[in-house]
Amino acid sequence: MIAILKLPIPMITAMIDTKVLDDKNRQLVVSMSSDYPIFKTARKLNISFFGGVLFDEDDVKLVMYLEKPKDFKREDTMFLSNILHKDMGNFLIVTDSSDNFSELKALGQALRIRSVVLDTIHFMDGNVVAYLRYFMADEPLITKMITFSSKYVPGFSLQYLGKGDKFMELFSKFNSYAKVSIISISYNPEPINNSEKMEQKDYIMEVKYAEKEKIVCVYQSKEDISNERIHRIKGEAEFFSGEVLDERLRELLSFLTIEDILTFRRVVRFQKGKYDIDFYILKSAQDLFLKNVGKFNENSKSGKLEITNVKGVDNEG
């Protein structure tokens, strides 16, 4: 079994209160052992790193974020010379698809369940550990996914299923392996005629995953926001699952974070025509994120972004 760390929780604040979402969550932690070359090498070198997934219809792309060591050793140089990667300055990005890493199909199956959110994938000790959250109403589908994966996915192992930690506790655990930050922004776009009906109603939402042309989320709203692309989660009066309908918001989220920056969580509050957004990210990507905010403001004709908070879990800011 993968050890579940119990650490003191640093004080850290986000702009958006997620209690209404967090109180619904149960946690699922699964691991997958694999002979995939990069994992075998990382185990030998004792390298730990985080990752996420992107969807393109049935294909699941694995995106891995490796922070550069402060002092490059000979084995680090050899490791990097043997893998295709994108150098982002403070970290590297390595991508691959489920065609090469078939174990990803288990995650793909889980994320199609309406309430499931992927927090992160942690690569350590040669294991691939995925942290997910879901609502109790979807437990029958979670059970189906677990039993299917246990039978057909090589190296699949259930590590934990039950009451979820508060997200900040989980975030603190990640911080013990790589420093993490929360960056908060506000976005007040220019009004457009005939905007989506849902966009006139207040809500809080959390991003589940991204596909090539859309972003899928879990919503909480006291009003009914369901339509042909957003569906009520079974047994829940205030919770929905579906796409980001406002094209301006979709483009903003895509531009800032989709592939080049790992996010552990993206939470959006829409209130009175204004978006507040909290991005939970690797601290090594913080400078790049802030540059992207600047680039967006330089090119945007629909409204400007305001940075309202930048805070690290270690309280260094």
Image (tube, grey):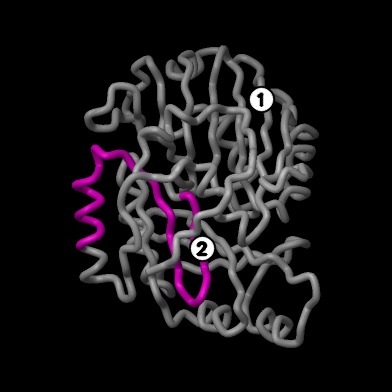
Tag shown at residue 277: none
The N terminus sits in image quarter: bottom left
In front of the other: 211 or 1: 1
**Element type where label 2 sits in the image:** strand
Which of the two labelled residues, at mark 2 and mark 1, occupies the earlier sequence position?
2
Q: Is residue 199 magenta?
A: no
The C terminus sits in image quarter: top right
Q: Amino acid at mark 1?
A: Tyr
Q: Is residue 143 magenta?
A: yes
> In which quadrant of the rendered view does residue 154 lie?
bottom left
Q: Circle 2 is placed at which residue position?
A: 122
In front of the other: 154 or 243: 154
The residue positioned 72% from the left and 26% from the top of the image is: 301
The residue positioned 54% from the left and 80% from the top of the image is: 43
- Please tell me whether residue 32 is drawn above or below residue 248 in the rendered image: below
The part of the chain drawn in magenta is 119-147
How many C-alpha atoms fall within 10 Å of the one at disc 2: few (<14), some, or many (≥20)? many
Point out residue 176 in the picture as x, y percentages from the top left corner.
61, 58
Point out residue 121 in the picture as x, y percentages from the top left corner.
49, 60
- Please tell me whether residue 132 is drawn above or below residue 12 in the rendered image: below
Q: Is residue 164 left or right of residue 190?
A: left
